[in-house]
Image: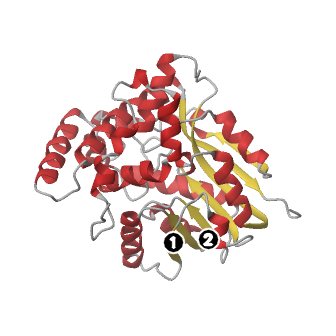
């Protein structure tokens, strides 16, 4: 497969949705196993097609966040990043790894907030190019750098005991196994180093034997480039099993917030918290989706975006609806927070 100048591979985008059954109720174990075995193609195919859509519809920080009443969308995203940094106790001068850094929005924000030096890891060439461009424009190229790599091979790339801290914001859900990626994170941390994660999980209310619950999980998967959605208890078990000592854990989606984390996805402009947020929320409304639907199709026809981008965009709509349903029913959380530490004598 040949790459474009910007790093995207058109065939990978075009083939993305083939990893799932068109009828989600017909998904079987062999479909999941195929995605797990091809996780790099699944994730890269998705982000080659979805990255610009994320930046247009969301921001340069590809994650969810909690809201105070009247809090601006971008302020909420930054607060979510600051909260993770504070819970981890990041200090000036620390060398920190961002696992699955996207286009570097959180890395830039946390670098400013905590005055740490961050290496952002990403396996997607298109996103790395954009991350470096945005970081240079922000004047942070001396503090935030980016490396291409596989988060299942961190120790091979960076060496043992290389970082004071590691964080992952809604990224390790893309791994073929939590135990595998958490083990790699533990290995690159120095003894006594801290690991903080916001994990995507199906909550304890989710029942894998319930066909409706199972279909919801598959809808979240296809619309977010995730090989397999897993239960929260499995994340906790994996962190402990690889040798971390949990210092704090909480599902922040369980907080009694008046404004739910998923409100921007509902597309109800009456719920916008600030004037500028009307634009963000409108993009998820029926009219906003119609505009993007037709615009992406036109751009694909004239070759401005890779073939398959429109279809990836359609899966984002499926995901948005599923995420709202998962949030309302408390079957899904994008913000299971765990702060854990590698033992000082490891």
Residue drawn at x 42%, y 68% is 128
Q: Name the residue under label 2.
A: 157
Residue drawn at x 22%, y 38% is 289
Determine which quarter of the picture holds residue 103.
bottom left
As drawn, the residue found furthest toward the bottom would be 142
Task: Give the Cα separation between the discs numbered 2 and 1.
Answer: 10 Å
On residue 9, the disc is none
Q: How crowded is mark 1: few (under 14 residues within 10 Å), some or many (20 or more)?
A: some
Q: Position of residue 53 (x, y in %)?
A: 29, 51
Q: Residues within 10 Å of mark 2 (few under 14, many from 20)?
A: some
Labels 2 and 1 touching (C-beta < 8 A): yes
On residue 147, the disc is 1
Residue 214 higher or lower than 342, as above or below: above
Helix, strand or loop at label 1? It is strand
Helix, strand or loop at label 2? It is helix
Say if residue 258 shows up in the picture. no
Q: Where is residue 258 in the image (x, y as percent from the top left)?
A: 49, 33
Residue drawn at x 57%, y 37% is 201
Q: Which mark is nearer the camera, 2 or 1? A: 2
Q: Where is residue 262 in the image (x, y as percent from the top left)?
A: 43, 36
Dividing the image into 4 quarters, which one contains the C terminus?
bottom right
């Amino acid at each position: 497969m040949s790459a474009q100048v910007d790093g995207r591979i058109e065939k990978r985008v075009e083939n993305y949705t083939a990893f799932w059954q068109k009828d989600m109720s017909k998904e079987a174990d062999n479909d999941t196993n195929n995605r797990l075995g091809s996780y790099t193609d699944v994730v890269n195919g998705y982000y080659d097609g979805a990255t610009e859509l994320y930046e247009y519809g969301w921001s340069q920080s590809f994650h969810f966040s909690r809201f105070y009443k009247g809090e601006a969308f971008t302020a909420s995203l930054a607060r979510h990043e600051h909260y993770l940094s504070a819970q981890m106790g990041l200090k000036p001068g620390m060398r920190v790894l961002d696992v699955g850094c996207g286009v570097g929005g959180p890395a830039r924000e946390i670098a400013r907030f905590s005055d740490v030096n961050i290496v952002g890891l990403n396996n997607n060439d298109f996103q790395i190019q954009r991350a470096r461009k945005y970081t240079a424009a922000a004047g942070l190229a001396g503090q935030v750098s980016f490396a291409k790599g596989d988060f299942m091979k961190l120790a091979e790339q960076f060496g043992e005991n290389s970082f004071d801290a590691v964080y992952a914001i809604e990224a390790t859900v893309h791994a073929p196994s939590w135990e595998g990626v958490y083990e790699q994170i533990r290995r690159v941390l120095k003894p006594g180093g801290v690991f903080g994660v916001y994990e995507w999980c199906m909550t304890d209310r989710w029942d894998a034997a319930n066909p409706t619950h199972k279909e919801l999980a598959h809808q979240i998967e296809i619309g977010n480039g995730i090989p397999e959605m897993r239960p929260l208890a499995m994340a906790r078990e994996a962190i402990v099993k690889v040798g971390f000592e949990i210092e704090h854990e909480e599902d922040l989606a369980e907080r009694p917030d008046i404004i739910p984390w998923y409100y921007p996805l509902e597309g109800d402009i009456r719920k916008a918290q600030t004037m500028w947020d009307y634009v963000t929320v409108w993009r998820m409304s029926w009219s906003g989706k119609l505009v993007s639907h037709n615009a992406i199709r036109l751009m694909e026809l004239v070759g401005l975006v890779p073939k398959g981008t429109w279809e990836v965009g359609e899966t984002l709509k499926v995901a948005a609806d599923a995420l709202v349903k998962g949030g309302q029913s408390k079957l899904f959380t994008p913000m299971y927070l765990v702060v854990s530490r590698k033992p000082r004598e490891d």
